Amino acid sequence: MKYCPLCGKEYEQGDTCERDGAVLVNAQPGTQLLIGQVLKGSYRIVEQIGQGGMASVFRGVQLPLERDVAVKVLLPTLHSTPSMVQRF
């Protein structure tokens, strides 16, 4: 599954969003569940902006200061591997 990082629309196929022309990104299972959530009471997750072999990167907002931040989250498939958690 791919989705548009700008508008959030999901696509089964294709490389660009039909609404805004943005390049689609692959969605890992569970990452969409983070969008809109507030982590540690201070960081609201706005959108996924990247993904690598170990983690997904999200654009967030630090609520007390209303400034943009990057939030890196370990992929769910690696949570149970202690060496990967330590490396992350």
Image (cartoon, helix red, strand yellow):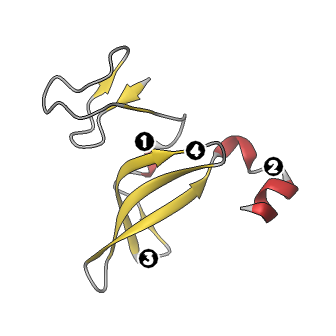
Q: Are marks 4 and 1 in contact (CB under 8 Å)?
A: no
Is residue 14 placed above or below 44 in the rendered structure?
Answer: above
Foreground mark, 1 or 3, reads 1
Q: Which residue is mark 3?
A: 41
Question: Relative to residue 68, is residue 56 drawn left or right?
Answer: right
Q: Earlier in the sequence, mark 3 or mark 2?
A: 3
Foreground mark, 4 or 3, reads 4
Is residue 72 placed above or below 10 in the rendered structure?
Answer: below
Q: Neighbour class for label 2 at 10 Å: few (<14), some, many (≥20)?
A: few
Q: Earlier in the sequence, mark 2 or mark 4?
A: 4
Q: Earlier in the sequence, mark 4 or mark 3?
A: 3
Q: Amino acid at mark 3?
A: Gly
Question: Which one is in front, 83 or 33?
Answer: 83
Q: Which residue is mark 4?
A: 52
What is the quadrant of the N terminus in the image? top left
* Residue located 53% across and 35% down the image: 28
C-alpha distance separating marks 2 and 4:
18 Å
Q: Amino acid at mark 1?
A: Gln
Q: Which residue is mark 2?
A: 80
Q: Neighbour class for label 4 at 10 Å: few (<14), some, many (≥20)?
A: few
Give the quadrant of residue 2: top left
